Image: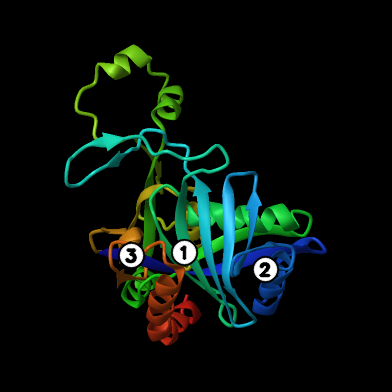
């Protein structure tokens, strides 16, 4: 089986006087260390929970690295077990003190604060880690974000353009939220057939032949801000051009720096196997990733 892994730079900010400053790598390590020191031991690892919804298993933790298995309570009761030989199906029998979890793996290099994330559907990496830090340090920190790491080619292409104009992004939302936003009657909505997906689109229109930014690097700030707020982002398009040329459209989500890991069907729940696979991929790409961060 294959699964994508994505690389991000973890950025944590705090108040200082009347401004915001970013924590350095050691300060971020110390925050996680403080959380780790207040966890409870379970088998060979330590764990903590938040609101009975998120569970953080510290599988590996030291000054150099951290490997978390993050579980989110799965409230979906529309799943069952099926026998692949007989085709018989039935409910998943769990005890009253048990629950199903959707999981993701979060690897952090404290020397660079680059996070490598391997996620399953239904759990937002940003939301889970932000909640952990903000719940503990809500009086101290003002913002937790994951800066996207984009490929070198797209960064160079955008930075060289004379004009960055329209910005448009789409994100998936529940149907009830869409209906309330557009004031559409539920019965009328139900009459619409062959609905493929539910998305909202926001378009920021810029004056013709004018640029949205004095400094083109600002588009990366906007991109990171929006991707951190909308975990189900489907597209992020920008229009850019040089003077006298036709504009080009770029979907920045297609240029996020990522990799793939291959594993056997039953290995995803084996943290040692996933740790070795994820760390190996990161180690091979570390130098290149650090170069990309320095150039943005």
Q: Which residue is mark 2?
A: 32
Callout count = 3
Q: Residue at x 31, y 71 (%)?
A: 261
Question: Element at badge 3?
Answer: strand
Q: Can residue 288 be seen here?
A: no
Earlier-in-chain disc, 1 versus 2: 2
Earlier-in-chain disc, 1 versus 3: 3
Q: Residue at x 38, y 76 (%)?
A: 277
Q: Quadrant of the N terminus?
A: bottom left
Residue 135: where, in percent of width, then height?
Answer: 70, 52
Q: Which residue is mark 1?
A: 105
Earlier-in-chain disc, 2 versus 3: 3
Other residues around mark 2 within 10 Å, as few (<14) / some (14–19) / many (≥20): some
- Quadrant hosting residue 249: bottom left
Q: CA distance from mark 2 to mark 3?
A: 25 Å
Q: Is residue 240 above or below residue 170?
A: below
Question: Element at badge 2?
Answer: helix
Q: Which mark is residue 209?
A: none
Q: Residue at x 18, y 40 (%)?
A: 87
Q: Nearer the viewer, mark 1 or mark 3?
A: 1
Q: Is residue 48 above or below residue 270?
A: above
Q: Nearer the viewer, residue 46 or 290?
A: 46
Q: Nearer the viewer, residue 184 or 68?
A: 68
Q: Residue at x 57, y 50 (%)?
A: 54
Question: Element at badge 1?
Answer: strand
Q: Residue furthest front?
A: 86
Residue 187: where, in percent of width, then height?
Answer: 33, 12
Residue 157: where, in percent of width, then height?
Answer: 32, 72
Other residues around mark 3 within 10 Å, as few (<14) / some (14–19) / many (≥20): few
Other residues around mark 1 within 10 Å, as few (<14) / some (14–19) / many (≥20): many
Residue 129 as seen in the image, left or right of residue 166: right
Q: Which residue is mark 3?
A: 4
């Amino acid at each position: 089986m294959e699964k994508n892994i994505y690389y991000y730079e973890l950025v944590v900010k705090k108040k200082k006087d009347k401004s915001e400053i970013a924590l350095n790598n050691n300060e971020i390590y110390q925050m996680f260390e403080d959380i780790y020191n207040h966890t409870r031991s379970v088998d060979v690892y330590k764990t903590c929970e938040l609101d009975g919804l998120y569970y953080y298993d510290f599988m590996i933790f030291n000054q150099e690295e951290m490997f978390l298995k993050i579980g989110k309570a799965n409230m979906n009761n529309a799943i069952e077990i099926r026998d692949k030989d007989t085709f018989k199906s039935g409910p998943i029998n769990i005890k009253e003190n048990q629950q199903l979890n959707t999981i993701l793996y979060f690897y952090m290099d404290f020397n660079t604060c680059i996070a490598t994330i391997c996620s399953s559907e239904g759990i937002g990496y940003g939301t889970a880690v932000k909640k952990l830090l903000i719940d503990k340090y809500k009086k101290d920190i003002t913002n937790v974000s994951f800066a996207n790491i984009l490929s070198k080619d797209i960064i160079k292409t955008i930075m060289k353009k004379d004009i960055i104009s329209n910005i448009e992004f789409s994100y998936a939302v529940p149907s009830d939220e869409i209906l309330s936003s557009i004031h559409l009657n539920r019965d009328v909505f139900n009459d619409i057939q062959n609905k493929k997906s539910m998305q909202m689109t926001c378009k920021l229109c810029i004056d013709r032949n004018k640029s949205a930014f004095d400094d083109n690097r600002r588009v990366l700030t906007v991109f990171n801000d929006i991707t951190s707020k909308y975990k189900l982002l489907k597209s992020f398009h920008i229009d850019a051009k040089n003077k006298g040329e036709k504009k080009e459209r770029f979907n920045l989500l297609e240029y996020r720096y990522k990799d793939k890991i291959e594993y056997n069907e039953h290995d995803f729940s084996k943290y040692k196997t996933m740790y070795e696979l994820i760390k190996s991929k990161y180690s091979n790409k570390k130098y290149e990733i650090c170069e990309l961060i320095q150039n943005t």
